[in-house]
Image: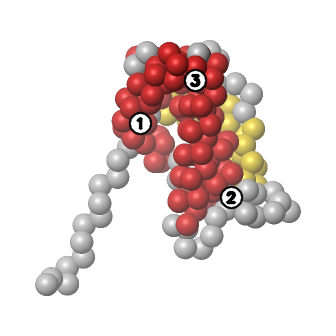
């Protein structure tokens, strides 16, 4: 046995992970839509993706040796921006506030190209706030518009409330 360190496992870009998930979910969505109608299909897909986002937040939080914070959260952002998946304009980054605009979203482009534009907000946008629930309940996100919803940019505003109960 060698004492040489093992190379780190390659990190899958998040946009590729989302493409794989969407390739499966599009068939689930179409099946649900055919059986229950569009409204119920969207509700079920939304609930499922929301649960996955919270679970992913918990999973990544568990890997934070020194605990979670707004800083540790902001340090995760490269996983979502990898391969130019998101273009950001950072407006502010402090211990209590992290504000940025997304000026290009390849996730939205990808979902539209896949014919999933009508549920792109469920597959991607809704994850942003719900991820925080699993990662750290003290982390709050506010957003008033998205590219997926037709806006020129997404306005992400995160805050960290030390007074909030940690889950």
User: Callout 2: helix, strand or loop?
Assistant: loop
Q: Which residue is mark 1?
A: 21
Residue 5: give x, y in percent of width and height. 24, 76
- The residue under the point 57% across, 39% down is 48
Q: Nearer the viewer, mark 2 or mark 1?
A: 1
Q: Are marks 2 and 3 in contact (CB under 8 Å)?
A: no
Classify residue 57 as left or right of residue 85.
right
- The residue under the point 61% across, 41% down is 50
Residue 40: give x, y in percent of width and height. 63, 23
> Tag on residue 95?
none
Q: Residues within 10 Å of mark 3 (few under 14, many from 20)?
A: many
- The residue under the point 43% across, 42% down is 14
Q: Residues within 10 Å of mark 2 (few under 14, many from 20)?
A: many
Sequence order check, earlier mark of 2 and 3: 3
Q: Quadrant of the N terminus?
A: bottom left
Residue farthest along the left direction in this orientation: 1
Residue 38: give x, y in percent of width and height. 59, 16
The image quadrant of residue 135 is: bottom right
Residue farthest along the front direction in this orientation: 35
Asked whether 133 or 142 is in front, the reply is 133
Sequence order check, earlier mark of 2 and 1: 1
Q: Which residue is mark 2?
A: 136
Real-space Cα separation, disc 3 to disc 1, in angstroms: 16 Å
């Amino acid at each position: 046995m060698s004492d040489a360190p093992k190379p780190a496992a390659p990190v899958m870009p998040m946009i590729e992970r989302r493409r794989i998930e969407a390739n499966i979910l599009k068939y689930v969505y179409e099946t649900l839509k055919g059986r229950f109608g569009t409204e119920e299909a969207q509700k079920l897909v939304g609930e499922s993706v929301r649960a996955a986002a919270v679970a992913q937040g918990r999973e990544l939080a568990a890997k934070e040796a020194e605990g979670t914070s707004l800083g540790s959260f902001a340090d995760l952002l490269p996983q979502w921006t990898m391969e130019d998946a998101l273009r950001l304009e950072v407006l502010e980054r402090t211990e209590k506030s992290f504000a940025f605009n997304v000026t290009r979203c390849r996730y939205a482009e990808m979902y539209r190209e896949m014919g999933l534009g009508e549920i792109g907000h469920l597959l991607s946008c809704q994850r942003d706030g719900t991820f925080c629930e699993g990662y750290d309940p003290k982390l709050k996100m506010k957003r008033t518009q998205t590219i997926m919803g037709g806006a020129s940019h997404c306005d992400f505003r995160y805050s960290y409330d030390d007074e909030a109960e940690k889950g």
